């Protein structure tokens, strides 16, 4: 029965590695000056999840561009959220679109 778990672990590792390599092949080449913008408004609903996903892609090497959060009418609570995110991710840029 142990061989079944070992086989499952090896197959899982192989599939995961294959997915990462395939994603790496599909990833566009890095270009200077590229930026991904996350538009944020109101209380910033969904902003944290989007930023965390983009930062994860950067750490994996699947995204190589600057990530910026644009203020499209954030409330005070939303600004605080973006401020906390920028402290957590020092490479995150903030843009106030007024």
Image (spheres, rainbow, N blue to C red):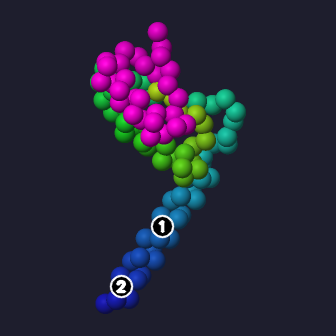
Quarter occupied by residue 34: top right
Instruction: Say if 26 sits above or below 35 in the image.
Output: below
Q: Quadrant of the N terminus?
A: bottom left
Side of 47 where 30 appears, left or right: right
81 on left or right of 68: left
Question: Which structural element holds mark 1?
Answer: helix
Magenta span includes 78: yes
Q: Which residue is mark 1?
A: 15
Could you tell which of marks 2 and 1 lies nearer the N-terminus? 2
Q: State whether residue 54 appears in this view.
A: no
- Judged from the image, the secondary structure of the residue bearing numbered disc 2 is helix
Q: Which mark is residue 4?
A: 2
Residue stretch in magenta: 70-98
- Residue 17 x %, y %: 53, 65
Q: Nearer the viewer, residue 52 or 29?
A: 52
Picture coordinates of residue 10, whole percent (x, y): 46, 77
């Amino acid at each position: 029965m142990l061989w079944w778990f070992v086989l499952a672990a090896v197959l899982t590792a192989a599939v995961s590695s294959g997915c990462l390599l395939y994603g790496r092949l599909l990833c566009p080449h890095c270009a200077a000056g590229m930026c991904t913008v996350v538009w944020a408004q109101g209380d910033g609903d969904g902003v944290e999840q989007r930023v965390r996903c983009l930062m994860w892609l950067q750490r994996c090497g699947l995204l190589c561009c600057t990530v910026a959060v644009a203020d499209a009418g954030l409330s005070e609570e939303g600004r605080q959220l973006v401020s906390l995110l920028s402290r957590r991710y020092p490479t995150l840029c903030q843009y106030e679109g007024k």
